[in-house]
Image (cartoon, rainbow, N blue to C red):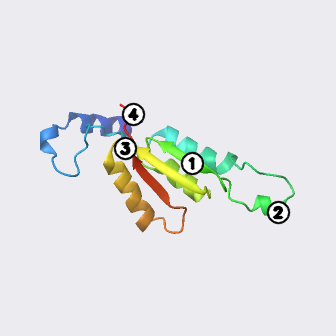
Amino acid sequence: ADSQDSLVDMALAMDEAEVEGPNQLQSGDPYGAVLWPAASSISNYLLRNCSHNWNEGDDEVLNTPPLSGLSILELGTGTGLVSLAASLGGASRVVATDYEQIPLKLLDYAQRNLNKGLTLIETAHLDLC
């Protein structure tokens, strides 16, 4: 938690004039660069506890990915861990949203280059404010 706080403090302390161009965060929000404990907990929960059609003794169901047939929408994807976990868990459709473009671009890169073979994660810019 201390390292997360340090990352957030450093990012907030940066003068926005120092970072310009396409990689500048529009709002100065560093939270997409931090892996929050909630993202880890939700990812673990999705992969361990969300078999919506689990039936003891049915081999076909037991071999079905836990999120098979479900659509998952992640609001505020940040690092994208929850969307990646949903994809790994076999969700039929995964949509990751964020109000910053950089986390979405990083997630696109991760799924294209590092996590091939998973359900395609759609990304969408979403700013509720």
* Nearer-N-terminus badge (2/1): 2
Disc 2 vs disc 4: which is toward the camera? 4
Dots 3, 4 in contact, CB < 8 A: no
Inspect the image, locate mark 2, and give the three-letter code of the amino acid beneath it: Asp
- Label 2: which residue? 59
The answer to which of 89 and 119 lies nearer the viewer is 119
Marking on residue 128: 4
* Nearer-N-terminus badge (3/2): 3
Give the CA separation, mark 4 to mark 1. 19 Å
Inspect the image, locate mark 3, and give the three-letter code of the amino acid beneath it: Gly
Disc 3 vs disc 4: which is toward the camera? 4
Disc 2 vs disc 1: which is toward the camera? 1
* Nearer-N-terminus badge (1/3): 3
- Label 3: which residue? 32
- Label 1: which residue? 72
* Nearer-N-terminus badge (4/1): 1
* Nearer-N-terminus badge (3/4): 3
In the rendered view, would you say 113 is above or below 53? below
Give the CA separation, mark 3 to mark 2. 39 Å
Where residue 104 sits: x, y (%)? Answer: 37, 51
On screen, residue 100 versus residue 79, left or right, reads left
Give the CA separation, mark 2 to mark 1. 25 Å
Inspect the image, locate mark 1, and give the three-letter code of the amino acid beneath it: Ile
The answer to which of 55 and 123 lies nearer the viewer is 123
- What element does badge 1 sit on? strand
